């Protein structure tokens, strides 16, 4: 007797992802937003524990080239560059790419090539590479198209990370606002979309301290929350100010974020 198909075949995780990302409270940022934040971002991620752990999980044996998608200032790819022939840093923020070049110069690395493109541009002229990485840069409208692009550009391996859970803001903070929060799609949408594409990915996890809200003043705290949630009302700003001064700044235990580290061999 043949096997009967399970109901998993009826679930279209790519479509479910599209619906969730569209309805999410947390909206994607424009390139100009990242241009403004580039310098601060570069300082925060330089030699961070997250970067070190990501690199420790990447196998570059028998590989000569790497494509870093959503590279930011190329903090990951530049640390791998001395062991490779060419490294390509692709990002839609021109200021991030300028910092990538500056970082390369400071490190005396001359095999970095920057590519100013977004997920939604045509990648016909983007070179293939033995390894393709996308670190914390998978916030796209169509996850299946994005995953297909990564697989197509990889000669050998793909390594990506995406958030476990649908928010960068701790639930305790969100609960203060009494606002309905629609989360981002969780990492499991990506895993199941890959499965539907015939790609059986490996999954590991990276747990890091959430430095996003390590601030000294209530004004900075409000700005950081607003960066994720969008415009806040005056009432919400007052609530957050009181919460920060009465509770948050006195917390001794750090908050943590967990990232799903997803990898697979090139599938033809």
Image (cartoon, rainbow, N blue to C red):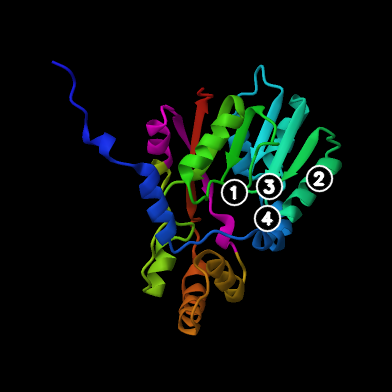
Coordinates of residue 101 in the picture (x, y in percent): 81, 45
Q: Which numbered disc, 3 or 4, marks the residue that appears first in the sequence?
A: 4
Coordinates of residue 267 in the picture (x, y in percent): 50, 24
Q: Residue at x 59, y 62 (%)?
A: 214
Disc 3 packing (10 Å; few <14; some 14–19; many ≥20): some
Q: Determine which residue is flagged by label 3.
A: 117
Tell me the SS state at disc 4.
Answer: helix
> Mark 2 and mark 3 in contact (Cβ < 8 Å)?
no
Disc 2 packing (10 Å; few <14; some 14–19; many ≥20): many
Q: Residue at x 57, y 47 (%)?
A: 137
Question: Any mark on residue 101, and which?
Answer: 2
> Marks 3 and 1, how far apart in space?
8 Å
Would you say 45 lies left or right of 166 here? right
> Marks 4 and 1, how far apart in space?
23 Å
Start-end of magenta stretch = 190-214
Tell me the SS state at disc 2.
Answer: helix
> Mark 1 and mark 2 in contact (Cβ < 8 Å)?
no
Judged by depth in the image, the label closer to the viewer, 3 or 4, is: 3
Q: Determine which residue is flagged by label 1.
A: 120
Q: Residue at x 75, y 55 (%)?
A: 95
Viewer-closest of 212 and 13:
13
> Marks 3 and 2, how far apart in space?
16 Å
Would you say 254 lies left or right of 215 here? left
Disc 1 packing (10 Å; few <14; some 14–19; many ≥20): few
Viewer-closest of 215 and 152:
152
Q: Which numbered disc, 2 or 1, marks the residue that appears first in the sequence?
A: 2
Would you say 134 lies left or right of 174 here? right
């Amino acid at each position: 007797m043949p096997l009967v198909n399970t109901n998993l075949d009826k679930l279209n995780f790519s479509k479910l992802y599209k619906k969730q990302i569209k309805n999410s409270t947390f909206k994607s940022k424009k390139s100009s937003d990242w241009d403004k934040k580039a310098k601060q971002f570069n300082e925060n991620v330089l030699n961070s524990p997250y970067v070190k752990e990501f690199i420790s999980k990447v196998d570059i044996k028998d590989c000569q080239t790497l494509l870093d998608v959503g590279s930011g200032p190329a903090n990951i790819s530049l640390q791998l560059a001395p062991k490779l022939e060419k490294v390509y840093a692709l990002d839609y923020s021109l200021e991030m790419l300028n910092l990538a070049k500056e970082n390369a110069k400071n490190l005396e690395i001359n095999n970095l090539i920057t590519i100013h493109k977004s997920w939604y541009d045509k990648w016909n002229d983007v070179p293939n590479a033995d390894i393709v990485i996308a670190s914390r840069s998978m916030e796209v409208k169509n996850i299946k198209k994005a995953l297909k692009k990564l697989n197509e550009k990889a000669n050998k391996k793909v390594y990506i990370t995406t958030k476990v859970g649908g928010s960068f803001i701790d639930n305790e903070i969100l609960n203060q606002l009494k606002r309905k929060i629609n989360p981002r799609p969780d990492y499991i949408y990506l895993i199941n979309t890959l499965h539907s594409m015939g790609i059986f990915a490996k999954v590991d996890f990276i747990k890091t301290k959430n430095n996003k809200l390590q601030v000294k003043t209530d004004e900075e705290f409000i700005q950081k929350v607003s960066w994720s949630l969008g415009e806040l009302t005056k009432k919400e700003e007052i609530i957050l100010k009181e919460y920060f001064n009465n509770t948050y700044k006195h917390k001794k235990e750090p908050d943590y974020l967990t990232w799903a580290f997803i990898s697979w061999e090139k599938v033809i």
